[in-house]
Image: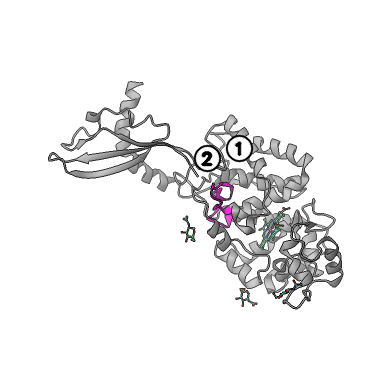
Amino acid sequence: MAFAKLLLCFLFKLVPLLFVLHHGASAHGLKVGFYAKTCPRAEAVVKEIMVETLKVAPSLAGPLNRLHFHDCFVRGCEGSVLLNSPTGQAEKNAAPNSGLRGFQIIDKVKTALEKECPGVVSCADILAIVARDSVVAMSGPYWEVETGRRDGRVSNITEALQNLLSPLSNITVLKAGFARRGLSVKDLVVLSGGHTIGTSRCSAFGNRLYNFTGKGDTDPTLDPEYIEQLKLKCKTGDQNSHVEMDPGSFKIFDVNYYTLISKRRGLFQSDAALLDDAETRAYVLSHANTYGTSSFFKDFRVSMVNMGKIGALTGTEGEVRKVCTKKFVVDHLVRQIRYSEDGTVIKQKYFEDPGGTTFQSCEPHLREPNSIARYKPFEVLGSNVKSV
Ligand code: HEM
Ligand SMILES: *[C@@H]1O[C@H](CO)[C@@H](O)[C@H](O)[C@H]1NC(C)=O
Ligand SMILES: *[C@@H]1O[C@H](CO)[C@@H](O)[C@H](O)[C@H]1NC(C)=O
Ligand SMILES: *[C@@H]1O[C@H](CO)[C@@H](O)[C@H](O)[C@H]1NC(C)=O
């Protein structure tokens, strides 16, 4: 025990160096089976909870899939969409995220994984695996999820407002939004197919039914018969009623989404906009009215993996949270002050010391054996610094 402490005291000098090396070594990113050694049952644990959850509440498949998308488009796939803010300033507090659901299922999965292998599986990876399992449960494709993401420590309401795409977006904005994250036009048209499952609130498309250009008119690009059906569900001013995005098969992951768009029944302007670009239009039409799903499934697997790479933190970046809604708690902030012989301060360093046991226990003379510099005993500046 004493030896271990002593070792830590010396090692700590090397910490900055180790960080650099380790970071460099893992910068290549994500891989399938990242937890094969550290938590071999990780994906099995997620699957068990997902199967059990969606058996009783299949309508959570859409929301659970969408969480990963909304995570990835703001700061990358690093779990920031899950963080809570005591002052209501987190991503999840932004209006475009107000319809997100299923957070309690993510918490349930995390709790189970913390029991299985504490501190190992990141919340960002949980979102990626859950997104896959929610599609599988709705009879969609299975793909190998790349893992190894770490969790970010920043969740900012303004960034969510700036980075999430509006359902009013035209094709130019959609293409630019995907391109900015390294995703192609094909990824855009394929991933939009995620709207084959789930529901939407009237607020996302109500303008198309009642007041499209501010003159009490309807959207001329939307099928008039469909408008009449939608008006039955969404009365004037109704923001919160839910409508199936793929009526009749909103619990089945299929190509019906593309059939609907080709019939001018895409629910959002952003769905309909896929007819306004040659490449996306060709994709929509080639998948409309087909009963086979294999080419869409193949594409969806690839595009989901592409999306999962956006801004991923790896190696020693970020952290692995214990609770997905909270940043890791920094127990102790430690300051080390280095003095020259005449007592002037040469350098101050600050360290986070989770648990508060590593640095406090160092003997002063062990801190820098070959230097004439002196150190004051390590000072604990604050303990139990609560996360926000
Ligand atoms: C291309 C730009 C996209 C826009 C503008 C968009 C917009 C929206 C909107 C407005 C809703 C309804 C939300 C509500 O009622 O609060 C929605 C729902 C949904 N979106 Fe998207 N989306 C986009 C792309 C995607 C992608 C890439 C995926 C996944 C791969 C996805 C998956 C879903 C799912 C599953 C739902 C249903 C959620 C539920 O049932 O609660 N969306 N989307
Ligand atoms: C949130 O993000 C915005 C936009 O990038 C930035 O101006 C603001 O300072 C950030 N807020 C916090 C608390 O970091
Ligand atoms: C698309 O929307 C953006 C932002 O609202 C707008 O500036 C642009 O002119 C629109 N492009 C087209 C082709 O309508
Ligand atoms: C329609 O939009 C216009 C312009 O935004 C607004 O002045 C008008 O009150 C709206 N009408 C209804 C019925 O909401």
Tell me which residue sits at (36%, 31%) in the image: 358
Principal secondary structure, stretch drawn in magenta: loop
The residue segment tinted magenta is 72-91
Q: Position of residue 264 (x, y in %)?
A: 80, 70
Dividing the image into 4 quarters, which one contains the N terminus? top left
| Marks 2,1: beta carbons within 8 A | yes
Q: Quadrant of residue 99?
A: bottom right
Q: Nearer the viewer, residue 281 or 349?
A: 349
| 275 left or right, relative to 39 | right
**Identity, as a three-letter code, of the amino acid under mark 2:** Arg
Q: Secondary structure at mark 1?
A: helix
Q: In the image, ligand 1 is in what quadrant?
A: bottom right
Q: Which residue is mark 2?
A: 321
Q: Quadrant of residue 176?
A: bottom right
Residue 5 visible, this orientation:
yes
- Using the image, tell me which numbered label, if any, was put on residue 110: 1
**Identity, as a three-letter code, of the amino acid under mark 1:** Lys
Residue 41 visible, this orientation:
no
Residue 75 in the magenta stretch? The answer is yes
| 329 left or right, relative to 16 | right
